[in-house]
Amino acid sequence: MITRIVKLTFREDAVDDFEVIWKESKDKIIQSEGCHYVEMLEAKVPSNIRFTYSIWESEEHLNKYRHSELFKKTWSKTKVLFDGKPEAWTTYKHSFVEK
């Protein structure tokens, strides 16, 4: 399993536009083969930063999604709203602590 974290910085006037895109696409993303979880996080400050957080069966599944028509369509609408270069990390969970 891998976790993908993507930091997206939007123009102040474009945040609401991204929220609409997210609402339209999140249910479709979770239905992608190998996707176990997806959510969007909002930075407290500055409020124009969002993070997508998704868990995938493997990097191959993530890459299959990244080459899909769904991704291409969603990304083309999203990238015109940026106020900074997106940053992305693919991570592996080594351990966790439970209370």
Image (spheres, rainbow, N blue to C red):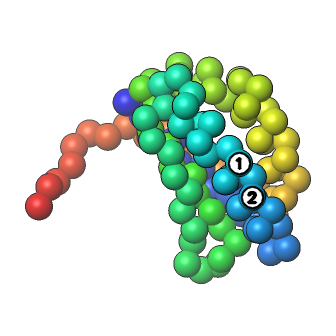
Residue 84 seen in the current view? no
User: The disc labelled 1 sits on which kind of residue?
Assistant: Glu
Q: Assign a secondary structure to mark 2.
A: helix
Position of 47 relative to 27 (above/below): below
- The numbered mark at residue 24 is 1
The mark found on residue 20 in the picture is 2
**Residue 34 image offset from top left, x and y in percent:** 48, 25
Q: What residue type is labelled 2?
A: Val
Label pair 2/1, CB-CB below 8 angstroms:
yes
**Marker count (numbered):** 2
Residue 41 horizontal/vertical position (percent): 54, 62
Q: Is residue 1 above or below residue 9?
A: above
Quadrant of the rendering where the C terminus is positioned: bottom left
Counting from the top left corner in percent of width and height, residue 49 is at: 66, 67
Disc 2 packing (10 Å; few <14; some 14–19; many ≥20): few
- CA separation, marks 2 and 1? 6 Å
Task: Measuring from the top left, give residue 71's x and y in whole percent.
Answer: 72, 34
Q: Where is the N terminus found, in terms of image quarters?
A: top left
Q: Tell me which residue sits at (57%, 52%) in the image.
A: 52
The residue sitting at the right extreme is: 80
Secondary structure beneath dot 1 equals helix
Q: How crowded is mark 1: few (under 14 residues within 10 Å), some or many (20 or more)?
A: few
Residue 48 vs residue 39: left or right?
A: right
- On screen, residue 22 versus residue 77, left or right, reads left
Image position of 88 (left or right of 20): left
Q: Residue placed farthest to the bottom in the image? A: 45
Q: Is residue 35 visible?
A: yes
Q: Which residue is more in the foreground, 61 or 26? A: 26
**In the rendered view, would you say 41 is above or below 80?**
below
